[in-house]
Image (spheres, grey):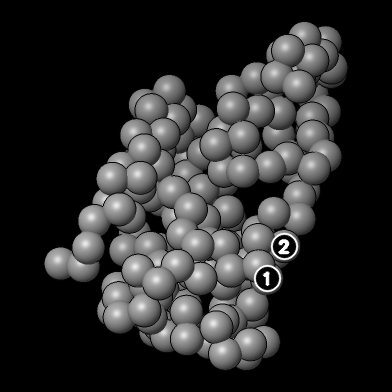
């Protein structure tokens, strides 16, 4: 896919928006932007929210995991959405494991806020000429996830 996007995007008119359908993860969006794509739509933030998966600045959080059962932290410390300001991972996990529809609503709300904030930051970094630096820092943050999620609670 990246080979095709990399070959076709530069051939498209520079004064028209470039749309890539069905993509993707936050990392995919940033990769596609680096190849010249402007717009996206995808089910990931909503579908994954409904199935208990949150996208965060430190990677994916599967709210079903037992490790979150008593975790009082928000889904993402760096997120300012209403869900992250008000609810803990433990509460969201409780809702999900109890079959409460509210879990899907809250996880979807966070995921959409995270995707929108990520793209807002992409646009800001392009305007300020710091896209490469932003991309590197964003990617490094995601790789911290694996290490921090495997540790027990502080
Ligand atoms: Zn959030």
Q: Residue at x 65, y 19 (%)?
A: 35
Q: Quadrant of the C terminus?
A: bottom left
* Residue 73, x across and y down, in percent: 30, 73
* Residue 57, x across and y down, in percent: 41, 51
In the rendered structure, find residue 50 and report the number of the disc placed on it: 1
90 in relation to 144, above or below: below
In this view, the residue in front, 69 or 47, is: 69
Q: Quadrant of the N terminus?
A: top right
Q: Residue furthest front?
A: 66
52 in relation to 1, above or below: below
Q: Is residue 145 visible?
A: yes
In the displayed structure image, the side of residue 149 where residue 45 appears, left or right: right
146 in relation to 56, above or below: above
Q: Residue at x 80, y 42 (%)?
A: 22
Give neighbour class at mark 2: few <14, some 14-19, many 20+ (Cα, 10 Å).
some
Q: Is residue 85 visible?
A: no
Badge 2 element:
helix
In the rendered structure, find residue 85 and report the number of the disc placed on it: none
- Marks 2 and 1 in Cβ contact (< 8 Å): yes
Q: Residue at x 34, y 59 (%)?
A: 78
In the displayed structure image, the side of residue 3 where residue 49 appears, left or right: left
* Residue 71, x across and y down, in percent: 30, 76
| Quadrant of the image occupied by residue 67 | bottom left
């Amino acid at each position: 896919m990246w080979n095709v996007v990399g070959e076709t995007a530069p051939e498209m008119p520079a004064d028209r928006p470039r749309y890539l359908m069905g993509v993707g993860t936050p990392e995919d969006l940033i990769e596609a932007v680096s190849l010249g794509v402007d717009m996206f739509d995808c089910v990931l933030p909503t579908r994954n929210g409904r199935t208990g998966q949150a996208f965060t600045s430190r990677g994916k959080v599967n709210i079903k995991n037992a490790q979150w059962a008593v975790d009082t932290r928000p889904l993402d410390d760096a997120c300012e959405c209403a869900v992250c300001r008000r609810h803990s991972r433990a509460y969201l996990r409780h809702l999900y494991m109890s079959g409460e529809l509210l879990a899907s609503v809250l996880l979807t709300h966070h995921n959409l806020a995270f995707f929108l904030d990520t793209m807002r930051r992409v646009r800001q970094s392009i305007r300020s000429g710091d896209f490469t630096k932003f991309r590197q820092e964003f990617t490094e943050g995601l790789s911290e996830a694996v290490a921090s999620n495997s540790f027990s609670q502080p």
